[in-house]
Each structure stands twice: as structure tokens, then as C-alpha cells.
Image (cartoon, grey):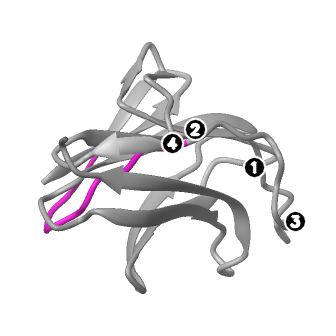
Amino acid sequence: MTLLFSESRLGFQRLFVAGTILAFAGLTATAQEAPSQSGLKVAEYQLGTSVENRLLKGAATRFVEGTQVFFWTRLTGGQDGDRVRHVWIYDGKEISVGLSVGAASWRTWSSKTLRPGSIGSWAVEVRDTDGVVLARAEFACVGDS
């Protein structure tokens, strides 16, 4: 089970996602890949090893198997009720995590744990409800050597 968080002005909204989900790590970026019809933009995104006080910690582009990895996103231009997906991609397979947007400026994140057998190249994307890729980060899972 993976715990996901979305920031709101009043606190945290907790979402629980069941199932087997793999984890990753990554890089910081500020460029948006494509515009969203709704005006929603990704102002910043990062992959790292934890989130503290709604900020990502341990940003990296390589993570060892067994690491819990967080994908942190700062969105602008949205409104309460908008939704985005964090789509984790490995070996041609996608795992999609739906997240709610609660205000014009919003931080949200999801986390995954890199399981044994997940060594290789990974990507994670932020997509709007139309499937438009708003941002993409690539990273590597490596063995413990």
C-alpha cells in the first residue's frame, strides 16, 4: 500500500492506493512539456527520497533497489476539482496514480518503493485528464553494490 498526499489550505488530504506499486527517484525541473486545455501548468517537479513540510528532500537521478521514492509536483493555474495523474513507467508498463487539485497553486506527491527486479531506466509523468503530458522526469534504479 502506498500513501499519497495532496496539499490543501486547510491541511492534508490523504489518499491510499492499494496494490503493487514500484518506487523511483529523480531530477528537478521547471519546464512544462505541453499546455493543458484547463490552464493547469506544472511549475516545478522533482524526484527524491522523502517529503518534509511539503518540500522534497533527497533529490536524485539514481536510486538503489528498495528505496522509497517520492515524485513531488507544484501545479499552477488549476482550480478546486481539477485532477492530474502521476504515471510511473518501467519496461513498457504504466502505473497511474490519480491526484486531486484543490487550488490555483497546489503541491502534491506520490511515492513508490523500488522492488527487487526493478533495475533499469524509469520515467514518471504528470498528465492532465486528457492524457496530455505536462512534465516528465527520467531516472535509474540501480543495484546495491
- Residue drawn 24% across and 65% down? 118
Nearer the observer, disc 1 or disc 3? 3
Q: Residues within 10 Å of mark 3 (few under 14, many from 20)?
A: some
Nearer the observer, disc 2 or disc 1? 2
Q: What distance separates the C-alpha of mark 3 from that of mark 4?
A: 25 Å
- Residue drawn 16% across and 45% down? 66
Which amino acid, mark 3?
Pro
The residue nearer to you, when weighing 109 against 70, is: 70
Residue linked to disc 3: 35
Which amino acid, mark 4?
Thr
Which amino acid, mark 2?
Gln
Q: What distance separates the C-alpha of mark 1 from that of mark 3?
A: 12 Å
- Residue drawn 19% across and 41% down? 145
Asked if residue 22 shows in the view, the reply is yes
**In-image side of 18 versus 139 (left or right):** left
Above or below, 140 against 133 in this view is above
Residue linked to disc 2: 46
The residue nearer to you, when weighing 60 against 57, is: 60
Q: Earlier in the sequence, mark 1 or mark 4?
A: 4
